[in-house]
Amino acid sequence: MEWKTRITEQLGIQYPIIQGALAMIGKAELAAAVSNAGGLGMITAWTLKTPDKLRAEIQKCRSLTDKPFAVNLSPTVDPILVPMREVAIEERVPVIETAGYRSEDHGKRIKEAGLLWYHKVQSVKHALSAEKHGADAVCIMGLEGAGLKSPNMLTTFVSVPLAARALKIPVIAAGGIGDARTFLGALALGAEAVLLGTVFCIAKECPLADRRKQVLVEADPYDPKWRDPILHTPTLEELQELMGAQGTKEIMQAAGKAERAGVPKEAGLDTVSLAIGFIDNVPTAKELIDDMIGGAEQILTSDGIGGWKAGPASSE
């Protein structure tokens, strides 16, 4: 099958699958592996700490793939991301993703440079604002997703179709997506691509330690120690503290408090999504994408929606 959407056409990729930003582990090897497998890999700028290290990582990624990949800029309130943005622009990274508060200035500069600007949001209101400011696509994350939550978030199942109805630009779905059914479901809801974070953490090319990956394989999304931190929404005081933060250390302290990073420490990650429920092995990025696409194609061509395929109409 040909998986053709406005996102695949914008990016020149085979499948509407994007690797999400991964703090501390979103580096060149994983990004290149995802891009080589037909999706869009992503380097997380903040993980590299300095503009020079980001430049080196972008160049390393280019040595590993001739396919498009992205750079993520978040948390956008951190001033170090301004020179990092300029590095990504100088290196002509095809698409730059922002997420969070005060992203308009980044977006304006990215667009002026002739690059694609994607922005990740948590509500339709903010998606419309990003569209107004010139974003080429908006990623909307449901409550099931990883990272800092907003008090007005809805679930992925509701957020995506509301955004698709309201916006003219393409919508990317994020939050709890991790297998063929959720991938296909997101497209049926109106998304033109999915953004996957947690499930790529267990890819063999991800630098997360093997013992940490095994923790995710064994994680139970019904267990409160996993479920409750994921679904936590911050208080107004926590959000005000984050928005008022300036330095990197202050920002991370405020973000950590707001996220209530309570997932088990042995996971080696501050936050994950409910997509942990779909993790049962440790594949390569290509195996993960091939399994997702193959499963979706089987549903569409053989199994039928919901595993039920209508037979010939009765003559009675």
Image (cartoon, rainbow, N blue to C red):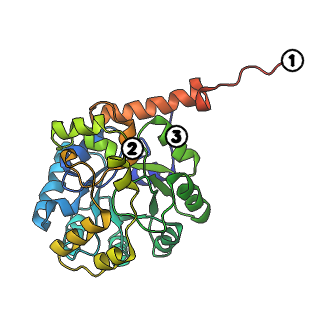
User: Residue at left 42%, top 34%?
Assistant: 292
Check disc 2: other Cα within 10 Å, few if <14, some if 14-19, many if 20+: many
Residue at 76% across, 19% down: 312
- Residue drawn where x is 53% and y is 46% of the image: 187
The answer for how far apart the CA atoms under marks 1 and 3 are is 33 Å
Name which residue type carries label 1. Ser
> Front-most of 296 and 38?
296
Do the CB atoms of the residues marked 2 and 3 lie less than 8 Å apart? no
Q: Which residue is mark 1?
A: 315
The local secondary structure at tag 3 comes to helix
> Is tag 2's residue or tag 1's residue first in the polypeptide sequence?
2
Q: What number is the disc on residue 184?
A: 3
Q: Dot 2 corresponds to which residue? A: 275
Q: Amino acid at mark 3?
A: Leu
Q: Give x and y (percent) for residue 167.
A: 57, 65
Observer-side mark, 2 or 1, equals 2
Looking at the image, the residue that sits furthest to the top is 315
With 182 as the anchor, is 195 left or right in this view? left
